[in-house]
Amino acid sequence: MRHRSKFLVIVDDSIELSVAIRFAAQRAKNTKGGIILLNIIEQFDPQQWQSVEEIIRQEATDKAQEKLQKWSKVIHDLVDIVPEVIIKEGIPSEKIIETLESDDAIRFLVLAAADADQPGPLVTLLAGQKSGKLPVPIVVIPQGLEDDVIDDLASRAN
């Protein structure tokens, strides 16, 4: 049985995230696919003050849920798709690869490159050092693209 293709977007605090969201949303709409939004929170080491650790973890989880809800609404308003949302705790590269390997319907990892000298930590890591370990292609959208250009790119090769 053929699964509908999914696009994985990593939700973080980067300014360029909006272009990755827009491309993935438009591409999912044009291919009748789905979207997964993944937010990774910092891994907490066991420490003596376990109650403080739990409070910090809960605050991080609440913040992650708020971000995911915000971007889910953006996607729904834009293309009428309700994305899957996932929160994981740990090292970002490991959790991204784990997510990609756990769902064979994910066809692309969509990232956005910052409009600066450096493309951003995720693009640098995943399109560089870890690129050979990824089970799917990476689509990197430049931050400086206008919405109409992103929409046009996302609509090609249906």
Image (tube, helix red, strand yellow):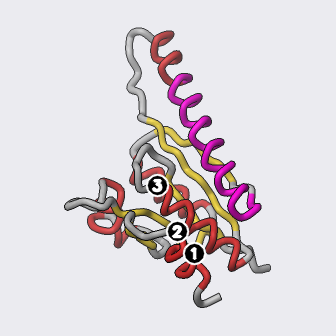
Task: Please check the rendered image and state whether residue 44 is part of the magenta-colored stretch, yes or no.
Answer: no
Upstream in sequence: badge 3 or badge 2: 3
- The reply to whether callout 1 and callout 2 are in contact (CB within 8 Å) is yes
* Looking at the image, residue 72 lies above or below residue 21: above
Residue position for label 2: 147
In this picture, residue 37 sits left or right of residue 145: right
Q: Would you name the residue on which mark 3 appears?
A: 17
Q: Is residue 67 magenta?
A: yes
Q: Residue furthest bottom?
A: 157
- Give coordinates of residue 121: x percent, y percent: 30, 54
Residue lying at 49% horizontally and 62% vertically, measured from the top left: 20
Residue 126 sits in quarter: bottom left
State which region is magenta: 58-81
Camera-side mark, 3 or 2: 2
Residue 141 lies in quadrant: bottom left
Q: Amino acid at mark 3?
A: Leu
Magenta-highlighted stretch: main secondary structure? helix
Three-letter amino acid code at the position of disc 2: Asp
Residue 146 or residue 120, whichever sits in front: 146
Question: 137 or 1, which lies in front?
Answer: 137
* Quadrant for the C terminus in the image: bottom right
Q: Hey, what amino acid is under mark 1?
A: Asp
Quadrant where the N terminus sits is: bottom right
Instruction: Residue 57: give x, y in percent of width and height.
Output: 51, 24
Q: CA distance from mark 3 to mark 2?
A: 13 Å
> Do tag 3 and tag 1 residues touch (Cβ < 8 Å)?
no
User: What residue does disc 1 label?
Assistant: 151
Q: In front: 3, or 157? A: 157
SS under mark 1:
helix
Task: Measure how far apart labels 1 and 2 are at the Cα level.
Answer: 6 Å
